[in-house]
Image (spheres, coloured by chain):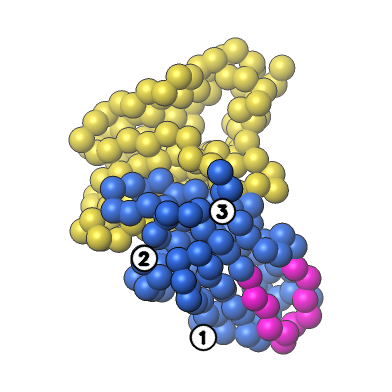
Amino acid sequence: DAGVIQSPRHEVTEMGQEVTLRCKPISGHNSLFWYRQTMMRGLELLIYFNNNVPIDDSGMPEDRFSAKMPNASFSTLKIQPSEPRDSAVYFCASSRTPGSYEQYFGPGTRLTVT
Amino acid sequence: DQQVKQNSPSLSVQEGRISILNCDYTNSMFDYFLWYKKYPAEGPTFLISISSIKDKNEDGRFTVFLNKSAKHLSLHIVPSQPGDSAVYFCAASGDSGGSNYKLTFGKGTLLTVNP
């Protein structure tokens, strides 16, 4: 079975450019999570969708970040405009809720903003 | 304010010996705890979990212990193998009344198992 799929795996962009990260959750999973991992802050939750509806976006750092989940098999995380401090690894994870706290992570997108 | 803390950034053990990774939490509302393992350039993978109604859960070489009064959990790996070398994350959930399945992660402990 395919796991969580993320694209691109690596993204290098210049400050001020728009960046879009993509995620395809595991089929049948109805919850989707976007995380950011940095050395300073570790693994932090940005936003959480359940049945395509945003449930908790308290971790989204500022208005430059936005996330959408137009259907059960696709989600995007957009940064516009990007800044060097956005450089991090961004993970998408999915799970089947209710009933399970176990989240399955994708391989991540390493974003570098110069 | 970190609600889940892994105070040891790294741990080194000999192959065949026991590895003990520790995790402390501050939020008394947490009622479910998980351990994840992460290899370089990969996403974290689920390892083992424990509910707050238990104090121990075992799965093969991996055992998680929970001490609710101390707000402390630990992961024991016996015997340790070189393939266990990875970053281990502790995570907690349940502080939103059961309707929010978000996880709060510690910063991780890098385990190195030497042959």
**Where residue B31 sits in the image (x, y, percent)?**
26, 46
Q: Colour of chain B?
A: yellow
**Disc 1 marks which residue?**
A63
**Disc 3 marks which residue?**
A4
**Where residue A13 sits in the image (x, y, percent)?**
77, 76
For the magenta stretch, what is the residue range?
A11-21
Q: Which residue is located at x 30 percent, y 61 percent? A: B100
**Amino acid under label 3?**
Val
**Amino acid under label 1?**
Asp
Residue at the top extreme? B16
The Cα atoms of the two marked residues, 3 and 2, are separated by 16 Å
The Cα atoms of the two marked residues, 1 and 2, are separated by 21 Å
Chain to which the residue tagged by mark 2 belongs:
A
Instruction: Say what secondary structure mark 3 lies in.
Output: loop
Q: Is residue A87 positioned above or below B27 on the image?
A: below
Residue B5 appears in the rendering: no
* B104 or B100, nearer to the observer: B100
For the residues bearing labels 1 and 3, Cβ distance under 8 angstroms: no
* Apparent side of residue B97 relative to residue B86 in the rendered image (left or right): left
Instruction: Say what secondary structure mark 1 lies in.
Output: loop
Q: Earlier in the sequence, mark 3 or mark 2?
A: 3
**Disc 2 marks which residue?**
A50
* A110 or A49, nearer to the observer: A49
Quadrant housing the N terminus of chain B: bottom left
